[in-house]
């Protein structure tokens, strides 16, 4: 039985984590930036699950992440990283706005349902 699969757990990344990324940052963090994910998986020792030893098995040699961040790492510019960080921040803001809109819609729907139930009981 593969118990290492059950020891993986996500940790949430902060904006400070994203802002501090460089081309020499751990692969898991660069992948989170590339995928606009706000988390990475770590093992029980708090080491990222995605690392140098399993990157090609995970993505393959032809994936855009592999080509951009691994194979051509030396030519990865700060401008590109800054653009990725800006995209990441924009995406996170959009997700937050959508979550807030959903919360408002849910609250209004629950209030409407409660009013309908109250009126139905009065009849």
Image: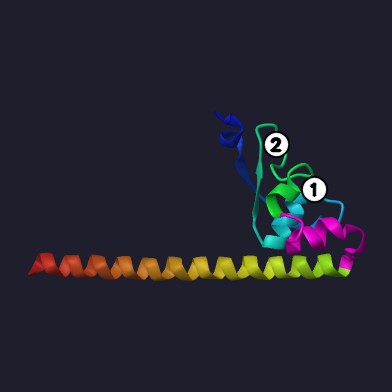
Give the residue displayed 70% in from the left and 65% down from the top.
88
Q: Which residue is located at x 59 percent, y 71 percent?
A: 94
Q: Is residue 34 above or below residue 105?
A: above
The numbered disc on residue 40 is none
Q: Is 57 in front, or is 104?
A: 57
Q: How is the image coloured?
A: rainbow
Q: State whether residue 84 is above or below residue 51.
A: below
Magenta region's main secondary structure? Answer: helix
Classify the position of the C terminus by image quarter.
Answer: bottom left
When the figure is inspected, residue 29 is found, relative to residue 107, above or below; the finding is above
Q: Is residue 113 left or right of residue 104?
A: left
Q: Is residue 102 left or right of residue 53?
A: left
Residue 103 horizontal/vertical position (percent) = 44, 65
For the question of whether residue 25 can be seen, the reply is: yes
What residue is rendered at 54% in x and 28% in y? 1
Q: Are marks 2 and 1 in contact (CB under 8 Å)?
A: no
Label 2 element class: loop
Q: Which residues are magenta?
A: 60-78
Label 1 CA crowd tier, 10 Å (few <14, some 14–19, many 20+): some
Quadrant location of residue 66? bottom right
Q: Is 42 colored magenta in this rendering? A: no
On the rendered structure, is 78 left or right of 19?
right
Q: Is residue 9 above or below residue 74?
A: above
Label 2 environment density (alpha carbons within 10 Å; few <14, some 14–19, many ≥20): few
Q: Residue furthest right?
A: 74
Which residue position holds label 2? Answer: 46
Residue identified by numbered label 1: 26
């Amino acid at each position: 039985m593969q118990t290492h699969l059950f020891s993986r757990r996500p940790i949430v990344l902060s904006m400070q984590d994203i802002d501090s990324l460089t081309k020499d940052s751990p692969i898991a963090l660069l992948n989170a930036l590339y995928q606009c994910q706000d988390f990475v998986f770590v093992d029980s020792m708090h080491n990222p699950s995605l690392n140098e030893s399993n990157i090609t098995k995970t993505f393959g040699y032809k994936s855009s992440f592999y080509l951009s961040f691994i194979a051509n790492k030396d030519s990865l510019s700060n401008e590109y990283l800054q653009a990725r960080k800006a995209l990441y921040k924009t995406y996170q803001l959009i997700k937050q706005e959508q979550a807030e809109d959903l919360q408002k819609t849910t609250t209004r729907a629950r209030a409407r349902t409660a009013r309908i139930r109250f009126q139905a009981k009065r009849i």
